[in-house]
Amino acid sequence: MLLSFRLNIRAKKTDDEEWHRLAPSVQTREVVCKEGQDLCTWFQVANIKTLHYNMYDVAIEILKGPSLKELHHQPINFRIAYVDSYFTHVQLEMRFLFGFLSFCLFFTYMLKIYVRMTPDQRKHLLMEQKGLGIVLFLFVLFNDPMFILHIRYPSLITFFMSELFQASFIAAIMIFWLVEVANSSRQPTKPLDELEFEGDCCQRSKLFCP
């Protein structure tokens, strides 16, 4: 069922004489109440991103509608929750630190490949070397560089991007680990010093060349 309500918020600082009224809004939320359960689904009434005042007065007015008859004997409890600003700052600093370290690790690895290897050698990179570069890039995204947007401007897009970054990194590292296990289980049929190379394979690999 749909529940419509009008939200009025006013706020003021300790030294202020008058209240500052925030813009009222009319919102509609879908409430699901299943049989055999005492609690219905919770819904968010308002989200104040930053507290600029010391005192807040919140008034919630349930509007008339067909859902009022269904909620006639159902109590509605409203709760207020807040996150300490110090905790938010520490969380952002830790995110920035781990994101910076992961970016330095990815940058160092890519710099080593493109500086210490010739263009011809880059064409013959091993699958493990390419996979490690992809994993390190996804590790940067795993630390969520958009986390500050998720805190300041929470939305469905920021939540989706954060979940996508984490899922991509976990999937990539699992695939990389499975490939490494599969390659390590393969045993060469001949010793390395008895392997024969055809054409310019020896020159490309620069191994065991006379």
Image: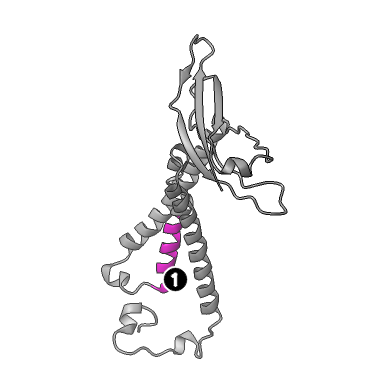
The x, y position of residue 39, in whole percent, is 68, 46
Magenta-drawn stretch contains 130: yes
Above or below, 187 against 60 in this view is below
**Residue marked by disc 1:** 128
x and y percentages locating residue 15 in the rendered image: 51, 9
Picture mark count: 1
Q: Amino acid at mark 1?
A: Glu
Q: Residue at x 38, y 54 (%)?
A: 107
173 inside magenta stretch: no
Q: Nearer the viewer, residue 210 or 105?
A: 105
Main secondary structure found in the magenta portion: helix
Q: Residue at x 43, y 39 (%)?
A: 153
Is 143 rendered above or below residue 14?
Answer: below
Give the left or right position of residue 198, taking residue 168 as reference. Answer: left
Question: How packed is label 1: few (under 14 Cα within 10 Å), some, or many (20 or more)?
Answer: some
Say which of 48 and 63 sits in front.
63
Q: Which residues are magenta?
A: 126-140
